[in-house]
Protein backbone atom coordinates (compact mmCIF):
# COMPACT_ATOMS: atom_id res chain seq x y z
CA UNK A 1 0.00 0.00 0.00
CA UNK A 2 1.45 3.33 -1.05
CA UNK A 3 0.37 6.91 -0.84
CA UNK A 4 1.42 9.79 -3.03
CA UNK A 5 4.63 11.41 -1.87
CA UNK A 6 4.39 14.86 -0.36
CA UNK A 7 7.28 15.75 -2.69
CA UNK A 8 5.80 14.64 -6.01
CA UNK A 9 6.34 17.31 -8.71
CA UNK A 10 8.36 19.56 -6.39
CA UNK A 11 12.05 20.37 -6.87
CA UNK A 12 14.68 17.77 -6.09
CA UNK A 13 17.60 19.57 -4.49
CA UNK A 14 20.91 17.71 -4.25
CA UNK A 15 23.37 18.76 -1.55
CA UNK A 16 26.61 17.17 -0.41
CA UNK A 17 30.36 17.31 -0.26
CA UNK A 18 32.39 17.76 -3.43
CA UNK A 19 32.67 14.47 -5.31
CA UNK A 20 29.54 12.87 -3.89
CA UNK A 21 27.99 13.02 -7.35
CA UNK A 22 25.52 15.93 -7.29
CA UNK A 23 26.19 16.95 -10.89
CA UNK A 24 26.38 13.37 -12.19
CA UNK A 25 23.26 12.17 -10.39
CA UNK A 26 21.42 15.41 -11.08
CA UNK A 27 21.97 15.00 -14.81
CA UNK A 28 20.57 11.45 -14.77
CA UNK A 29 17.61 12.40 -12.59
CA UNK A 30 16.70 15.30 -14.84
CA UNK A 31 16.81 13.01 -17.88
CA UNK A 32 14.57 10.42 -16.25
CA UNK A 33 12.00 12.92 -15.03
CA UNK A 34 12.23 15.20 -18.10
CA UNK A 35 12.92 18.04 -15.69
CA UNK A 36 15.36 20.85 -16.35
CA UNK A 37 18.70 20.47 -14.59
CA UNK A 38 19.92 23.50 -12.70
CA UNK A 39 23.59 23.08 -11.81
CA UNK A 40 24.35 26.01 -9.55
CA UNK A 41 28.11 26.04 -10.16
CA UNK A 42 27.50 26.09 -13.91
CA UNK A 43 24.98 28.95 -13.67
CA UNK A 44 27.29 31.00 -11.46
CA UNK A 45 30.22 30.43 -13.82
CA UNK A 46 28.09 31.42 -16.84
CA UNK A 47 26.86 34.59 -15.13
CA UNK A 48 30.35 35.67 -14.18
CA UNK A 49 31.90 34.60 -17.46
CA UNK A 50 34.59 32.63 -15.65
CA UNK A 51 35.06 29.30 -13.89
CA UNK A 52 34.28 28.79 -10.20
CA UNK A 53 38.02 28.41 -9.73
CA UNK A 54 38.62 31.83 -11.32
CA UNK A 55 35.86 33.48 -9.26
CA UNK A 56 37.47 32.21 -6.06
CA UNK A 57 40.89 33.38 -7.24
CA UNK A 58 39.98 36.84 -8.48
CA UNK A 59 36.96 37.82 -6.33
CA UNK A 60 37.25 35.63 -3.27
CA UNK A 61 35.07 33.05 -1.54
CA UNK A 62 32.78 35.60 0.16
CA UNK A 63 31.80 37.03 -3.22
CA UNK A 64 31.07 33.52 -4.51
CA UNK A 65 28.94 32.67 -1.45
CA UNK A 66 26.79 35.79 -1.87
CA UNK A 67 26.24 34.99 -5.51
CA UNK A 68 25.42 31.39 -4.61
CA UNK A 69 22.69 32.48 -2.15
CA UNK A 70 21.24 34.87 -4.71
CA UNK A 71 21.16 32.26 -7.49
CA UNK A 72 19.65 29.67 -5.13
CA UNK A 73 16.80 31.93 -4.17
CA UNK A 74 16.11 32.83 -7.79
CA UNK A 75 16.17 29.22 -8.95
CA UNK A 76 13.81 28.12 -6.21
CA UNK A 77 11.08 30.44 -7.47
CA UNK A 78 10.27 27.64 -9.95
CA UNK A 79 9.23 24.06 -9.32
CA UNK A 80 9.67 20.72 -11.12
CA UNK A 81 13.45 21.02 -11.47
CA UNK A 82 16.50 19.05 -10.41
CA UNK A 83 18.94 21.35 -8.67
CA UNK A 84 22.56 20.33 -8.13
CA UNK A 85 23.95 22.72 -5.56
CA UNK A 86 27.57 23.57 -4.94
CA UNK A 87 29.14 21.66 -2.07
CA UNK A 88 29.20 24.68 0.24
CA UNK A 89 25.64 25.82 -0.41
CA UNK A 90 24.55 24.29 2.91
CA UNK A 91 26.85 26.50 4.98
CA UNK A 92 24.34 29.32 5.39
CA UNK A 93 21.31 28.78 7.59
CA UNK A 94 19.15 30.85 5.26
CA UNK A 95 20.10 28.70 2.26
CA UNK A 96 19.17 25.56 4.20
CA UNK A 97 15.79 27.00 5.19
CA UNK A 98 14.94 28.03 1.62
CA UNK A 99 15.89 24.59 0.29
CA UNK A 100 13.76 22.75 2.86
CA UNK A 101 10.84 24.94 2.00
CA UNK A 102 11.07 24.56 -1.78
CA UNK A 103 11.70 20.90 -2.49
CA UNK A 104 12.89 17.49 -1.45
CA UNK A 105 16.42 17.97 -0.19
CA UNK A 106 18.67 14.96 -0.82
CA UNK A 107 22.10 14.80 0.83
CA UNK A 108 24.59 12.64 -1.05
CA UNK A 109 27.42 11.32 1.12
CA UNK A 110 30.49 9.17 0.50
CA UNK A 111 33.49 8.13 2.54
CA UNK A 112 36.81 9.90 2.24
CA UNK A 113 38.46 7.18 0.12
CA UNK A 114 35.72 7.26 -2.50
CA UNK A 115 35.64 11.05 -2.64
CA UNK A 116 39.42 11.27 -3.03
CA UNK A 117 39.28 8.64 -5.78
CA UNK A 118 36.59 10.57 -7.63
CA UNK A 119 38.12 14.04 -7.48
CA UNK A 120 41.80 13.10 -7.84
CA UNK A 121 43.45 14.91 -10.71
CA UNK A 122 40.58 17.37 -11.21
CA UNK A 123 41.79 20.94 -10.72
CA UNK A 124 38.38 22.63 -10.82
CA UNK A 125 37.77 22.56 -7.07
CA UNK A 126 39.64 25.47 -5.48
CA UNK A 127 39.01 24.30 -1.92
CA UNK A 128 40.78 21.00 -2.64
CA UNK A 129 44.02 22.52 -3.92
CA UNK A 130 47.11 20.98 -2.31
CA UNK A 131 46.97 17.65 -0.49
CA UNK A 132 43.58 16.39 -1.68
CA UNK A 133 43.09 13.76 1.02
CA UNK A 134 43.97 16.17 3.81
CA UNK A 135 41.66 18.85 2.35
CA UNK A 136 38.75 16.40 1.93
CA UNK A 137 39.17 15.15 5.52
CA UNK A 138 39.36 18.67 6.95
CA UNK A 139 36.33 19.97 5.05
CA UNK A 140 34.27 16.87 5.85
CA UNK A 141 35.07 17.30 9.54
CA UNK A 142 34.16 21.01 9.42
CA UNK A 143 30.88 20.24 7.66
CA UNK A 144 29.93 17.03 9.39
CA UNK A 145 26.71 18.52 10.74
CA UNK A 146 25.92 20.83 7.84
CA UNK A 147 24.45 18.16 5.56
CA UNK A 148 22.23 16.60 8.24
CA UNK A 149 19.25 18.87 7.61
CA UNK A 150 18.22 17.04 4.41
CA UNK A 151 14.94 15.16 4.03
CA UNK A 152 16.76 12.14 2.58
CA UNK A 153 20.39 10.95 2.80
CA UNK A 154 21.97 8.51 0.34
CA UNK A 155 25.45 7.07 0.93
CA UNK A 156 26.83 6.82 -2.60
CA UNK A 157 30.14 5.13 -1.70
CA UNK A 158 29.16 1.69 -3.01
CA UNK A 159 26.40 2.70 -5.43
CA UNK A 160 26.58 3.52 -9.12
CA UNK A 161 25.04 6.85 -10.16
CA UNK A 162 22.06 4.93 -11.61
CA UNK A 163 21.51 3.17 -8.29
CA UNK A 164 21.59 6.50 -6.47
CA UNK A 165 18.93 7.78 -8.88
CA UNK A 166 16.72 4.77 -8.16
CA UNK A 167 16.91 5.42 -4.39
CA UNK A 168 15.98 9.05 -4.87
CA UNK A 169 13.10 8.38 -7.26
CA UNK A 170 11.59 5.80 -4.92
CA UNK A 171 11.43 8.40 -2.20
CA UNK A 172 10.27 11.13 -4.55
CA UNK A 173 7.37 9.31 -6.12
CA UNK A 174 5.87 7.38 -3.27
CA UNK A 175 6.15 7.04 0.44
CA UNK A 176 5.60 3.58 1.90
CA UNK A 177 2.80 3.69 4.41
N1 LIG B 1 28.13 6.92 -7.44
C1 LIG B 1 29.29 7.15 -8.09
N2 LIG B 1 30.16 6.15 -8.28
C2 LIG B 1 31.33 6.36 -8.91
N3 LIG B 1 31.76 7.56 -9.40
C3 LIG B 1 30.93 8.59 -9.25
C4 LIG B 1 29.66 8.46 -8.58
N4 LIG B 1 29.07 9.66 -8.55
C5 LIG B 1 29.93 10.52 -9.18
N5 LIG B 1 31.03 9.88 -9.60
C6 LIG B 1 32.19 10.48 -10.29
O1 LIG B 1 32.82 11.34 -9.34
C7 LIG B 1 33.27 12.53 -9.96
C8 LIG B 1 32.64 13.75 -9.23
O2 LIG B 1 31.23 13.73 -9.44
P1 LIG B 1 30.40 15.08 -9.54
O3 LIG B 1 31.14 16.11 -10.33
O4 LIG B 1 29.04 14.70 -9.99
O5 LIG B 1 30.40 15.54 -8.01
P2 LIG B 1 29.78 16.84 -7.36
O6 LIG B 1 29.11 16.38 -6.12
O7 LIG B 1 28.92 17.54 -8.37
O8 LIG B 1 31.05 17.72 -6.99
P3 LIG B 1 31.14 19.34 -6.78
O9 LIG B 1 30.50 19.66 -5.47
O10 LIG B 1 32.60 19.63 -6.75
O11 LIG B 1 30.45 19.99 -7.94
C9 LIG B 1 32.88 12.43 -11.43
O12 LIG B 1 34.02 11.98 -12.16
C10 LIG B 1 31.80 11.36 -11.47
O13 LIG B 1 31.81 10.63 -12.67
O1 LIG C 1 32.24 22.58 -1.26
C1 LIG C 1 32.43 23.76 -1.65
O2 LIG C 1 32.58 24.70 -0.84
C2 LIG C 1 32.45 24.02 -3.10
C3 LIG C 1 31.97 23.06 -3.97
C4 LIG C 1 31.86 23.28 -5.43
O3 LIG C 1 30.65 22.71 -5.88
C5 LIG C 1 31.91 24.77 -5.79
O4 LIG C 1 30.71 25.42 -5.45
C6 LIG C 1 33.06 25.44 -5.10
O5 LIG C 1 34.24 24.82 -5.55
C7 LIG C 1 32.96 25.32 -3.57
MG1 LIG D 1 28.95 19.50 -9.16
Image (tube, rainbow, N blue to C red):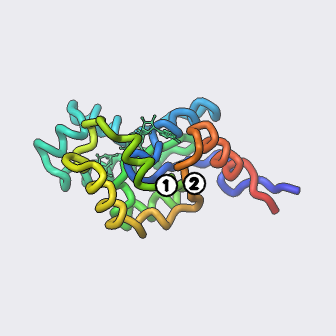
3D distance between C-alphas at marks 2 and 1: 6 Å
Q: Residue at x 26, y 53 (%)?
A: 65
Which residue was labeled with disc 2? 154
Residue at disc 2, secondary structure: strand
Query: Taking the image as drawn, is residue 74 in sight?
Result: no
In this orientation, which residue lies closer to the viewer: 156 or 87? 156
Q: Position of residue 33 (x, y in %)?
A: 64, 35
Q: Which mark is residue 156?
A: none
Q: Quadrant of residue 39?
A: top left
Query: Taking the image as drawn, is residue 4 in sight?
Result: yes
Query: In the rendered structure, which disc, 2 or 1, sits on the residue that comes first in sequence?
Result: 1
Q: Position of residue 156 (x, y in %)?
A: 54, 49
Which image quarter holds the N terminus?
bottom right
Whether the residues at callouts 2 and 1 have beta carbons within 8 Å, the answer is yes
In this orientation, which residue lies closer to the viewer: 172 or 28? 28
Q: Residue at x 55, y 45 (%)?
A: 79
Q: Residues within 10 Å of mark 2 (few under 14, many from 20)?
A: some
Q: Which mark is residue 109?
A: 1
Q: Residues within 10 Å of mark 1 (few under 14, many from 20)?
A: many
In the picture, measured across the screen, residue 22 lies left or right of residue 32, that is left
Q: Position of residue 2 (x, y in %)?
A: 84, 55
Residue 120 against residue 31 in the figure, above or below = below
Which image quarter holds the C terminus?
bottom right
In the picture, measured across the screen, residue 58 lies left or right of residue 73, that is left
Q: Position of residue 27 (x, y in %)?
A: 51, 33
Amino acid sequence: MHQESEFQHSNIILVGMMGTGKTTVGTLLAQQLSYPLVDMDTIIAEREGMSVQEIFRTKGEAYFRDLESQVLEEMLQSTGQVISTGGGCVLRELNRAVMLDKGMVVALTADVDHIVGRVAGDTNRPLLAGDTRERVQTIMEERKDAYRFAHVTVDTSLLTPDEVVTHILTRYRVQAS
